[in-house]
Amino acid sequence: MLPSGMDLQVELSAHPVRVLVTGATGYIGGRLVPRLLARGHHVRCVVRDPDRVAGRDWPGVEIVPGDLADDSVLPAALEGIDVAYYLVHSMAEGDAFRERDRMIAEAFARAAGEAGVRRIVYLGGLGRPEEVHSRHLVSRHEVGRALTEGGVPVVEFRAAVIVGSGSASFEMIRHLTERLPLMVTPRWIDTRCQPISVRDVLDYLLRTLDDDDVRGIYEIGGRDVLSYREMILHYARVRGLRRIIVALPVPRPSLSSRFVDLVTPIPYRIAHPLIQSLQTEVVVRDDRALGEFAVRPMGYDEAVERAMARLGTDDVETTWASSLASLSRGQPEGRQLSAHEGMLLERHRSRVESSPERVFDVVCELGGDDGWPAGNALWQLRGLLDRALGGVGMRRGRRHPRELRAGDPLDFWRVEVIEAPHLLRLRAEMKLPGRAWLQFEVLPDAGGALLEQTALFEPRGIIGYLYWYAVRPFHRFVFPGLVRAVRERAEGTCPGPGHR
């Protein structure tokens, strides 16, 4: 089934093939799989955590659990495969990731040759090897070479910035432009780049299945060659914004990376290799791809407009929300503060001596006329403040005292996702300098259950960060108490709603 609003022209393939997709939980892989299915191909995915794809509407996809770093996984993953898409790589700092990525690629290439795979399709990074100074881009080229060592023909696409809703590069540009009327930037802001729409990248990847003769390295890019300064200003023009950019010498890329981590959803571990890459000119110098593939890439402004249209209608295929299911039996109980893909998180975990079904039922009874079992006065005060600011406040209550369904209002929350008896995610609809969610996950655990409660906040600008840290003292009282109350009610040591 195609994702809603998917605008790629899709036709059934005259010759369906057996395809392996690695990196299926990633940005490109998660969009490639449904398009392969729409063309009638047989798709297999190898993923480390099958739960990450359990909720996707991918009928007929075969899932092989495992890590590509484990050689024992490769024979089962590659058996009977015609074409393998290699879409995995590390974004960690340090030199270790280069060696790890190269070794995994070499093992994959050998296993593919032994399995009789006809072709490997790889998405790497643009840039002339002799001019590349970024360890991230150097590693992408090394992986491309390693994949050829198993004797299987390789099609390597090299792309620069991919423009699409949810892509790391685009989100970095989007949030910097939206939040900063005046930008003081490093001098790499004037480095040239040839951005390409995610739609066109996917089109290239798909069309490798139409011609058995294509192989080698193909440089791909959009119609426009722009500096990063021009990309920001073009984005601003599309959005009707006025932005001023001043370029100054910044001695260390890590400083820019820390700033990006602060004001955008892109965390430092991803921002740092991206910032390093921005110092290298990445433009297409060999345009063979235009002659050998029936793809006519769009311009940058059109790609931005399409991405913004997706964001405006919440029609984003691959997004940060797909990685929210994070509960692990190996993680400790108690309180944890962290950041994830630009989200500020506060998690509380607890083991409950009751069935997952009972725990989930208790979670679904929270709020409404019976209030919140921890810090209810604070919840009501927050509701009154929201009403004073013109928000919905706590007056909406709930549709049913015990049952919830997707879309239901729950005080100043809205039920965004409910998957009984494991997951409930509430989206805040009160006035906030950002976006907020409250999520509950429940898993079975040796006759009992594990409960994880996560508060998530995506701040909007500096005011959003100040708000989060201002309310944290209240969180220290409310959120642990909420987990404790759910546990006690589920275990029967504390009366629940209707018994007080």
Image: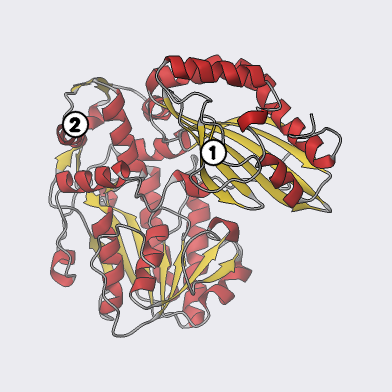
Q: What quarter of the picture does the C terminus occupy?
A: top right
Answer whether labels 1 and 2 touch (C-beta < 8 Å): no
Q: Is residue 122 above or below residue 230?
A: below
Tag 2: residue type? Ala
Residue 496 in the image, given as x and y percentages of width and height = 77, 35
Tag 1: residue type? Leu
- Viewer-closest of 339 and 413: 413
Sequence-earlier tag: 1 or 2: 2
Toward the right, the furthest residue is: 493
Quarter of the image holding residue 7?
bottom left
- Viewer-closest of 373 and 241: 373
Pointer 2 residue: 236
Toward the bottom, the furthest residue is: 15
Q: Residue at x 62, y 15 (%)?
A: 473
Lateral position of residue 8 relative to residue 398, left or right: left
Q: Is residue 77 above or below residue 316?
A: below
Residue 471 in the image, given as x and y percentages of width and height = 56, 17
- The mark found on residue 482 in the picture is none
Mark-to-mark CA distance, 1 and 2? 32 Å
Quarter of the image holding residue 479?
top right
Lateral position of residue 459 relative to residue 311, left or right: right
Q: Secondary structure at mark 1?
A: strand
How many residues crowd around disc 2 within 10 Å: few (fewer than 14), some, or many (20 or more)? some
Q: What quarter of the picture does the N terminus occupy?
A: bottom left
Look at the image and tell me whether residue 197 can be seen. yes
Lateral position of residue 155 relative to residue 448, left or right: left
Pointer 1 residue: 426
Residue 477 in the image, given as x and y percentages of width and height = 69, 20
Query: Which label sits in the foreground, 1 or 2?
Result: 1
Look at the image and tell me whether residue 469 can be seen. no
Q: Secondary structure at mark 2?
A: helix
- Viewer-closest of 4 and 143: 4
